[in-house]
């Protein structure tokens, strides 16, 4: 079974509107971390936001927030007030277990977001 | 501040030729180091990771190998490239402990003809 599932094939949003990018995960670990990365056309992976499995509040970083629903095993990214520069591919990732020497991230297949002017 | 450098940025190689991609990290000590590959339009696949000099863990059997000759240097190699080795290769580092947020290099785009 896939550990990270991103099923939206492509998303479109009007500039200045909010958009939600979906991510579901599968793990039997009690301790894990969830990440979102942005990949613009240049190819570089840019870290956006992190949520720990024991964090009770949803993570927020500027215009980015993570809607963490533990029982549903979902970690959706919400981008508020979309900008043209938000057009990119977005990847959800998970770290199973505690962060440490042997930690590694598993990535989903990504979602393409296009922001319309 | 920490920086990660990866080169070359672009590479076109014939089938059967060798490969060497290099990654170096500055401004930190004893980082965890990773090599990921991204096929066109796909997610990232972890190839290798390293927790210290000379310590390499391979995630998938393949035509590639990795080495860590120095604390902040990570090299991806192949003796004979295959067509299927084409892709976008990303090096990343993370500090030991903590949330394990990965910081990526700019990537190396390899085309095998």
Image (cartoon, rainbow, N blue to C red):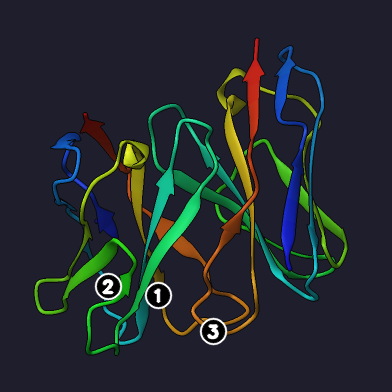
Residue A48, image x and y in percent?
A: 41, 60
The structure residue drawn at horizontal position 67% and vertical position 35%, both measured from the top left corner, is B63
Residue B71, image x and y in percent?
A: 85, 68
Residue B48 placement, left or right of A28: right
Q: Are marks 2 and 1 in contact (CB under 8 Å)?
A: yes
Please rate how many residues cluster around mark 2, counting C-alpha atoms within 10 Å: few if below 14, some from 14 to 19, many from 20: some
* Residue at which label 2 appears: A27
The span from disc 1 to disc 3 (Cα, nearest Å) is 13 Å
The span from disc 3 to disc 2 (Cα, nearest Å) is 19 Å
Q: Residue furthest right?
A: B69
- Chain letter for mark 2, please: A
**From what the image shows, is residue A24 above or below residue A102?**
above
Residue A96 - label: 1
* Residue at which label 3 appears: B98
Q: Secondary structure at mark 1?
A: strand
The structure residue drawn at horizontal position 52% and vertical position 67%, both measured from the top left corner, is A104
Residue B112, image x and y in percent?
A: 65, 16
Which is more toward the observer, A101 or A63?
A: A63
The span from disc 2 to disc 1 (Cα, nearest Å) is 7 Å
């Amino acid at each position: 079974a896939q550990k990270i599932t991103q099923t939206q094939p492509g998303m479109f949003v009007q500039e200045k509107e909010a958009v939600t990018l979906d991510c579901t995960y599968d793990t039997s670990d009690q301790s894990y971390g969830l990440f979102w990365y942005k990949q613009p056309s240049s190819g570089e992976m840019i870290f956006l936001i992190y949520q720990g499995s024991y964090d009770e509040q949803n993570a927020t970083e500027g215009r980015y927030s993570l809607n963490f629903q533990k029982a549903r095993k979902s970690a959706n990214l919400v981008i508020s007030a979309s900008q043209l520069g938000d057009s990119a591919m977005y990847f959800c990732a998970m770290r199973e277990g505690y962060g440490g020497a042997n930690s590694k991230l598993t990535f989903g297949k990504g979602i393409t977001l296009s922001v319309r002017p | 501040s920490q920086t990660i450098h990866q080169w070359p940025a672009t590479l076109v190689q014939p089938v059967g030729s060798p490969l060497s991609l290099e990654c170096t990290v500055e401004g930190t000590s004893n980082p965890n180091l990773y090599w990921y590959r991204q096929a066109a339009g796909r997610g990232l696949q972890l190839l290798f990771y390293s927790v210290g000099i000379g310590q390499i863990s391979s995630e998938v059997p393949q035509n590639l190998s990795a080495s860590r000759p120095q604390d902040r240097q990570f090299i991806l190699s192949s003796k004979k490239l295959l067509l299927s080795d084409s892709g976008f290769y990303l090096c990343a580092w993370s500090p030991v402990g903590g949330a394990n947020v990965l910081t990526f290099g700019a990537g190396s785009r390899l085309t095998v003809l």
